[in-house]
């Protein structure tokens, strides 16, 4: 009986790995600049046909920009925390509606981080099956020993 359950589990897992994950974002309010508010996606690397939007700067360049311009980090070297920002990238590659999604427990720090991210306005738009689409990106980060590090970017 255990072998049968294990085999069924493997078959189920195998079928799931071939499935296409496609997440859509439900827009509660209209957002000026979005190309198609009914088709806003959260795209994922590694899934066929999905290409995430690309920031004009590399991960290292964005980290450098944040660490140089966020004064709170320099003034509070013992501060430890994490956070997340959200941004919509439209089909033209324009960054819209930057927001803090997960706070660091310091409103001053959150504001300074958000101000830096808001300077990243022009992106390469994401694509779904080679068509440029509107996307929502989440960018997570950690702060430890006076340094902000992006998790995935």
Image (tube, helix red, strand yellow):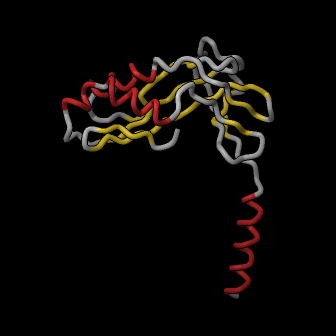
Q: Quadrant of residue 145?
A: top left
Which residue sits at x=74%, y=78%? 7
140 to 36, vertically: above or below: below
Q: Nearer the viewer, residue 96 or 2?
A: 96
Residue 28 rendering spot, x and y as whole percentages: 58, 23
Q: In the picture shown, does residue 40 fall above or below 10?
A: above
Q: Nearer the viewer, residue 2 or 134?
A: 134
The image shows residue 130 at horizontal and vertical percentages of 80, 32
Q: Residue at x 61, y 25 (%)?
A: 27
Taking the spot 70% from the left edge, 17% from the top edge, the residue there is 35
In the rendered view, tell whether residue 82 sits above or below residue 31: below
Q: Which residue is more in the foreground, 114 or 1?
A: 114
Give how far across and how far down residue 16 sits, in percent.
73, 59
Q: Position of 137 compared to 142: left or right? A: right
What number of labels is visible? Answer: 0
| Quarter placement of the N terminus | bottom right
């Amino acid at each position: 009986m255990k072998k049968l359950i294990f085999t069924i589990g493997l078959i189920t897992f195998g079928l799931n790995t071939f499935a296409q994950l496609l997440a859509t974002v439900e827009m509660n309010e209209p957002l000026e600049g979005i190309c198609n508010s009914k088709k806003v996606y959260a795209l994922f690397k590694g899934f066929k046909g999905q290409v995430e939007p690309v920031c004009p700067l590399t991960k290292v360049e964005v980290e450098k920009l944040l660490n140089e311009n966020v004064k709170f980090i320099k003034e509070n070297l013992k501060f430890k925390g994490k956070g997340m920002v959200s941004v919509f990238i439209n089909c033209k590659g324009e960054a819209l509606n930057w927001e803090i999604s997960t706070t660091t427990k310091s409103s001053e720090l959150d504001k300074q981080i958000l101000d830096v991210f808001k300077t990243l306005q022009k992106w390469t738009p994401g694509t779904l099956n080679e068509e440029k689409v509107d996307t929502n990106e989440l960018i997570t980060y950690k702060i430890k020993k006076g340094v902000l590090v992006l998790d995935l970017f």
